Amino acid sequence: MQKKLAMMMTAGQAVRQIRLDKHMALREAAGEAISVAQLSRFETDRQDLGINVLLQVLTNVNSNITEMRHVQLAGESDIAVDRLVAQLKAQGKSPAEWAMAAQADLQKYAHDPTRRLERLVAGALWIYLTESYGIQPAIPADSRRRLVAEAQGYLGRVETWGVTELSLYNLYSPTLADDDLFTLMKPALSRGKSYIGLYEYFKIVPFILNTNFSIFVSHNRLDLATATLRMTEDFLADEGSGIVAPRIFYIFNQGLLLFKQDQPAAGRQKCAEAIRVARIFDEDTVIGVLTGRLQKWENHYQEAGFTNILI
């Protein structure tokens, strides 16, 4: 597993390899489409490019999207945040071991300005695991404040969000106040829609909607949870009609809302319906996640302080 992750190549790394193979300088590859500094950041996974800009850069190096995908490992994710999370999880088999790996990376990159993304991802994962699973040691309060401030400061400075920014927003969403999180959700999605490729858009948007719903329903903000379900319904109707897993989670989330509305029988029925649909489409990973979550909700939903946040 470790070897596979190490071999995975991002879009930026693939563009760099194509450029170097053709003995082209950064300025030649950037052309009029982008600055040399922006292209350099893209090639080192510190910035994302919109699909139109990426296509222009590929044209500048006499290449195309097909060649770029061929240079990458076919079928692997080129989303940098996903890759970093996967690398941390590959270092252990349990949330406690993942938290230890995240803690080690956070300490390793604490003062390295070139490893901001690694630091922010490790910090977000450590925060989530300690606060959602009760794993010790918890992240120190001052470290948590610095990380959250750094993440929010970075997201506030970037006018056009790409895959990295949307992924970081999703990872740090549990650290935001509920009303702030909901207020940011619409502009976050609209800022990303025109800037990232369709594959990444259809992958990330359902995650954001699902994460935010799980936060709102866990915090008993049923008004915000209901509004998020409506946004999910609109997304599925307008743009996501052909994708299966987000629709399954949408059905399941309707059931969780019914639990919170003191309708456990109806909630159980709706959640079971989602699991049945997942079985029809052989969504084995989704089945495992939802079966475990339903069991937790059946046993603990009435307990004070019960949360079940999913990122």
Image (tube, rainbow, N blue to C red):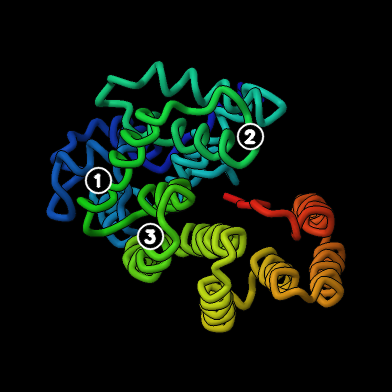
Disc 1 marks which residue?
Answer: 153
Query: Element under label 3?
Result: loop
Residue shown at 29%/44% (left/top)? 47
Task: Indicate the position of residue 62 as horizontal and vertical percent values.
Answer: 29, 48
Task: Indicate the position of residue 123 as horizontal and vertical percent values.
Answer: 44, 32
In the rendered image, which quarter is residue 233 located in? bottom right
The answer to whether 194 is drawn above or below residue 3 in the figure is below
**Crowding at mark 2 (Cα within 10 Å: few <14, some 14-19, many 20+):** few
Can residue 18 be seen in this snapshot?
no
Left or right side of 155 for 237: right
Disc 3 marks which residue?
Answer: 196
Q: Of marks 1 and 2, which one's residue comes earlier in the chain? A: 2
Residue shown at 63%/34% (left/top)? 134
- Between the C-alphas of marks 3 and 1, the distance is 21 Å
Q: Of marks 3 and 1, which one's residue comes earlier in the chain? A: 1
Say what amino acid the circle numbered 2 marks: Gly
Kindly check if marks 3 and 2 are in contact, taking CB atoms under 8 A apart as contact.
no
**Crowding at mark 1 (Cα within 10 Å: few <14, some 14-19, many 20+):** few
**Crowding at mark 3 (Cα within 10 Å: few <14, some 14-19, many 20+):** many
Say what amino acid the circle numbered 1 marks: Gly
